[in-house]
Amino acid sequence: MYIETNKQVDGGFEAELKAAGFEFTPKWTTRRSVGGVVEFNYPRALYLPGLNESFRGDVVAVINAHVPYFGHIANKIQEVKAEAGRRIIQRMPEWKQRNYTALSIELTRKEVNKHILTPEEEATVLFLEGEWEWAKSIRDASDLIEVAIAAMTDAEAGELDVTTRPEWNV
């Protein structure tokens, strides 16, 4: 029997099936058998070898009870990356980042060619360094939040508002 589902399961799923009276190891596939003909490239399916079709409802109930959240950890990690990008762009839009980069190149070239920077140029260098340090701190915060999310259960990640994490307070 094949049961199509979009659920992700963890190692406890087999134990849940056994607790429900199904003594077999489930296999996941992207193929199914219809009228004895195997078809490929279908949505994720649970393959239950040798299980009678009359048990379909019972197995579906176990699947539905398992992993009430689906894919939240991966989704929240993507949300964190997007939030970091949003924060950086809010403070330094892309046009400003391009201007800062060009200015940094000019000032670096001037220093390399042994020109003495004016006080205004020195102040600009310090400003650019500060902006870059701030952007790196946002990236570091993003990394810390991602590590915290990876340690959560999928259900915990599903409840998380990534925008309010204290790590962002840099």
Image: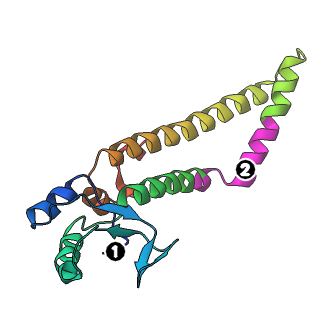
- Residue at the image position 19 percent from the left and 82 percent from the top: 57
Q: Is residue 148 left or right of residue 101?
A: left
Q: Which residues are magenta?
A: 89-103
- The location of residue 63, given as percent across then percent down, is 24, 70
Q: Which structural element holds mark 2?
A: helix
Q: Which residue is mark 1?
A: 2
Q: Is residue 118 left or right of residue 38?
A: right
Q: In the rendered structure, which amino acid carries the disc numbered 2?
A: Lys
Q: Which structural element holds mark 1?
A: strand
Q: Which residue is mark 2?
A: 96
- The location of residue 51, given as percent across then percent down, is 22, 72
The image quadrant of residue 167 is top left
In the rendered image, the vertical position of residue 73 relative to residue 34, given as above or below? above
- For residue 149, which numbered disc appears in the image? none
- The kind of secondary structure the magenta stretch mainly shows is helix
Q: Furthest residue to the top? A: 114
Q: Nearer the viewer, residue 133 or 52?
A: 52
Which of the two labelled residues, at mark 1 and mark 2, occupies the earlier sequence position? 1
Q: Furthest residue to the front? A: 36
Instruction: State the quadrant of the N terminus.
Output: bottom left
